[in-house]
Image: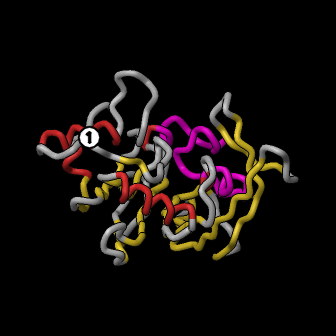
Amino acid sequence: MNTINIEDTVLYEDKYILVCQKPAGFPVQSKRLGTLDMECALRNYLAKKGQEPYVAVIHRLDQPVQGVLVFAKDKESAAKLSKQMQQGKFEKTYLAYTQGHTDKKQETLIYELEKDGRTNTSKVVAKKTANSKRAELSYKVLKETEEGSLLEVSLKTGRHHQIRVQLAHAGLPIFGDAKYNAKCTKEDANHGVSLCAYKLSFLHPAKGKKMEFQVMPVGNFPIV
């Protein structure tokens, strides 16, 4: 995806924050010169409205993953939201359409994950190492199809490619994930990774009230 209409992604905006629905295939931030990302697109959006083009990234989604993100519009809001993130006060819930089925309709997965910066991948390691980090998530099965299972996933930690790696290791690789699903076909990959950050809640940095957002995923998800 090369271009988006950034106005269409905005779910909520006030003088402190912007909440958006990031499309799949669009980066939150990019180091590549000339590559448009959510951060730059939102800065341009604010500048066109005559506002200070300050956009602080608080949390991220992998480029192939879609879903809800909050950005701060000033430094004080950014600091408060970042502190909430560090304290685990953000509630992030995902929908994942996985290949295969499981007898466990609800489970918590705890693994040690090790990131390989050269290949931009992560893997599960049997024992804790100097470079590994503890990763924890919980899932429950919402629906089953002939091909797979629709899971609701709650993150307890925020590791690199965490959901994709942990579910694949548990025998539930995500449809369309060419990086971690060995069974992924070219056709599946063309549909995109079937992973969506569909719920997000946090405390408003200025008002202190709980903010909750929910979106419907787009693409290969068995949603009725």
Q: Quadrant of residue 52?
A: top left
Instruction: From the top left corner, tell me how far across and down residue 183 is, in percent.
Output: 64, 43
Provide residue 100's location: percent of width, then percent of height. 63, 59
Residue 18 on the magenta segment? no
Query: Does 93 sit above or below residue 134?
Result: below
**At x 50% / y 45%, what residue is drawn?**
62
- Please indicate whether residue 102 sits to the left or right of residue 208 in the image: right
What residue would you read off at disc 1?
A: 43
Q: Quadrant of residue 139?
A: bottom right
The stretch of residues the image draws in magenta is 164-189
Q: Position of residue 53 (x, y in %)?
A: 24, 42
Q: Nearer the viewer, residue 5 or 159?
A: 159
Task: Name which residue type carries label 1.
Answer: Arg
**Which image quarter is the N terminus in?**
top left
Rendering quarter of residue 42: top left
Task: Tell me what residue is drawn at x 32 percent, y 31 percent.
Answer: 2
Q: Residue at x 43, y 43 (%)?
A: 191
Instruction: Look at 38% across and 51% down and name the residue there.
Output: 219
